[in-house]
């Protein structure tokens, strides 16, 4: 392997890890606070991608400008879903929320399929495909922009959870539901907001992905799986863990993808299962946010 | 229901099912065979997911192993008959389940669920890439057998065996051990239950059932390809069948499989494009309102007490009242 090839692999892994961190961020928050593995996360990502696609197709809104709009829409939808459905069974055994979100995923993906058809789409603004070269290594502008947006959102969520009153209430609810309730936290509202933030972050990830990959209604499933693997690799409990997990996963995916593309998932899951058995709490994880 | 009446009902239903191939068209019979195969898979999942409480999300792996082993042995130079190839597939599935189960069953909750999901996905990729054995993504073609009642009777016999096995195990040391693990694994271990052994047995038994269903479906479809025989949808269907009927009960998986598959066939033939939406709505409805399934609903309805519209509201809202946050 030449040094140029190595450099390109490193840059690709870095750019990939940015978007993957955002993909996993909302998933990790919902899992850490509410102990829900949200299998409809991928469907929210797809919805974000379609929102950006339609805003660009109809009103020519730049995909980066449409991110806040798609986040706002997904925030509202996430809050509604959480309050009306998930909060109703949140203390039931684990299989219940697991299957409930799986049912939601099937439903949302099928409805997208029904209304928007299974055509492959992509968002290509004027600057897509452009980039700059750094020695022998190529850096596309869109992916670099996505990396910055992802990092900004990761840091913003970290600051929100650590510094703001609402963020601390969210963390308190994740640590001890009853204690939080006794301190005057409205738990149902907090759960609703947490899930809504998770959905909004998924929407942002979808908006960014729509400019990087061609997508169809089934884009989400593999990203839900990636989000899970990232959370396991990095561990729950802190936004920094998501960054660590995403970086590790990106390296695995880029290296395995260039060597054994047909067995990429077999290798990735092999690593995952081994890691789970050796260290179930992740590489740097604690239980909570 | 008193016991003699129950046996009588069972005998009547069984006699009706035995005569079914004589009165319905071969196409209709195909639907009923599908119901029986789903019931078989659901019965298997019930051991690990229902009684032992481990949310196995990868049982389609054993379905696929059963299908491929049966097909490959029937096509091999020995040309094994179906009744030798299918048990071989079941045995291989049990061995694989034990090998996978020993490490993976140490995981709990979400981790176990996703790990099993990943194992199934990995097996699909292996089946799609191992060209010299499985002919890759093209798949393999089995010998043709055209009498559709053959598959129906084989599946029916296995489902009846499954019912008997479940009923016997439910009242055995093994069955009680599974339930103890489900309710509190640490307490079960303190009581002297070899939890690893019990869990692996449940997992292997669920693999046997899934593999036998895979063998039947493979022989009936005469073509086995990785994308058809390792799809997550099969896992989902067996879990949904169990949930609809009632997990951790003898009749639940069979009842759930019948309700789900007949409903699904109806939806499929009338609103093909929205089929998954309806599937999603069924899942959501049962998880929110009837997570313990129809068997539990019947049991609660049979209880003495006031009847009328209010009782229905109470029955449907009991779960939400117990598990929501406010």
Image: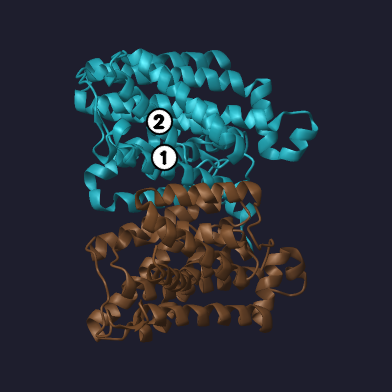
Chain colours: A brown, B cyan
In this image, B198 relative to A272: left or right? Answer: right
The residue lying at 62 percent from left, 32 percent from top is B199
The residue under label 2 is B65
The residue lying at 46 percent from left, 68 percent from top is A20
The residue under label 1 is B123
Q: Which residue is most to the right?
A: B190
**In the rendered image, is residue A261 in sight?**
yes
Please identify the quarter of the rendering in which residue A232 is found: bottom right
Looking at the picture, tell me which residue is in the foreground, B76 or B146: B76
Please identify the quarter of the rendering in which residue A168 is found: bottom right
Whole-angstrom CA distance, mark 1 to mark 2, is: 9 Å
Q: Position of residue A17 (x, y in %)?
A: 47, 70
Question: Mark 1 or mark 2: which comes first in sequence?
Answer: 2
Q: Position of residue B71 (x, y in %)?
A: 31, 24
Which secondary structure, mark 1? Answer: helix
Chain where mark 1 sits: B
Q: Tell me the tag on residue A132.
A: none
Q: Answer whether labels 1 and 2 touch (C-beta < 8 Å).
A: yes
């Amino acid at each position: 392997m030449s040094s140029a090839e190595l450099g390109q692999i490193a840059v690709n892994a870095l750019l990939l890890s940015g978007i993957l961190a955002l993909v996993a961020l909302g998933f990790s928050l919902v899992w850490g606070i509410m102990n829900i593995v949200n299998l409809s996360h991928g469907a929210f990502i797809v919805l974000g991608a379609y929102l950006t696609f339609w805003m660009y197709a109809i009103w020519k809104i730049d995909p980066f400008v449409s991110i806040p709009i798609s986040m706002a829409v997904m925030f509202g939808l996430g809050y509604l879903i959480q309050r009306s459905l998930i909060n109703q069974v949140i203390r039931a055994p684990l299989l219940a929320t697991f299957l409930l979100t799986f049912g939601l995923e099937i439903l949302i993906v099928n409805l997208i399929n029904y209304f928007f058809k299974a055509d492959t789409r992509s968002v290509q603004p004027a600057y897509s495909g452009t980039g700059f070269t750094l020695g022998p290594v190529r850096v596309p502008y869109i992916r670099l922009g996505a990396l910055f947006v992802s990092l900004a959102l990761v840091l913003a969520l970290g600051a929100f959870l650590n510094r703001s009153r609402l963020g601390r209430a969210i963390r308190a609810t994740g640590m001890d539901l009853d204690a939080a309730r006794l301190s005057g936290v409205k738990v149902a509202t907090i759960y609703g907001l947490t899930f809504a933030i998770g959905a909004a972050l998924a929407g942002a990830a979808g908006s960014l992905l729509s400019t990087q990959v061609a997508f169809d209604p089934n884009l989400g499933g593999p990203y839900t799986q990636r989000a899970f693997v990232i959370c396991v690799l990095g561990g729950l409990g802190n936004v920094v863990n998501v960054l660590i997990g995403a970086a590790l996963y990106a390296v695995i995916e880029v290296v395995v993808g260039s060597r054994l593309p047909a067995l990429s998932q077999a290798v990735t899951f092999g690593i995952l299962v081994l890691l789970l058995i050796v260290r179930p709490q992740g590489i740097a994880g604690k239980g909570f946010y | 229901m008193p016991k003699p009446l129950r046996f009588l009902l069972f005998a009547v239903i069984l006699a009706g099912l035995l005569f079914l191939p004589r009165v319905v068209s071969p196409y209709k019979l195909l639907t009923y065979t599908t119901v029986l195969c789903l019931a078989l898979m659901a019965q298997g999942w019930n051991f690990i997911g229902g009684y032992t409480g481990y949310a196995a999300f990868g049982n389609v792996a054993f379905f696929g192993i059963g299908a491929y082993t049966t097909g490959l042995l029937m096509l091999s130079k020995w040309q094994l008959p179906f009744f030798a190839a299918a048990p071989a597939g079941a045995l291989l599935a049990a061995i694989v389940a034990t090998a996978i189960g020993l490490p993976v069953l140490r995981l709990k909750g979400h981790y176990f669920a996703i790990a099993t999901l990943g194992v199934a996905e990995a097996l699909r990729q292996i089946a799609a890439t191992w060209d010299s054995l499985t002919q890759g993504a093209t798949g393999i073609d089995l010998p043709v057998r055209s009498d559709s009642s053959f598959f129906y009777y084989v599946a029916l016999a296995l489902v009846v065996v499954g019912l008997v096995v479940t009923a016997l195990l439910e009242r055995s040391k093994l069955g009680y051990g599974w339930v103890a693990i489900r309710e509190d694994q640490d307490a079960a271990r303190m009581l002297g239950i070899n939890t690893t052994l019990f869990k692996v047995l449940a997992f292997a038994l669920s693999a046997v059932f899934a593999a036998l269903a895979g063998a039947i479906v493979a022989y009936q479809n005469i073509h086995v390809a990785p994308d058809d025989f390792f799809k997550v949808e099969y896992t989902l269907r067996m879990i949904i069948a169990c949930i609809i009927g009632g997990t951790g009960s003898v009749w639940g998986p069979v009842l759930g499989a019948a309700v789900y598959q007949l409903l699904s066939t109806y939806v499929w033939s009338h609103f093909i494009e929205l089929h998954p939406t309806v599937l999603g709505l069924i899942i959501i409805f049962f998880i929110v309102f009837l997570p313990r399934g129809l068997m539990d609903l019947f049991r609660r309805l049979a209880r003495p007490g006031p009847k009328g519209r209010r009782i229905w509201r109470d029955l449907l809202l009991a779960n939400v009242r117990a598990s929501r946050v406010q």
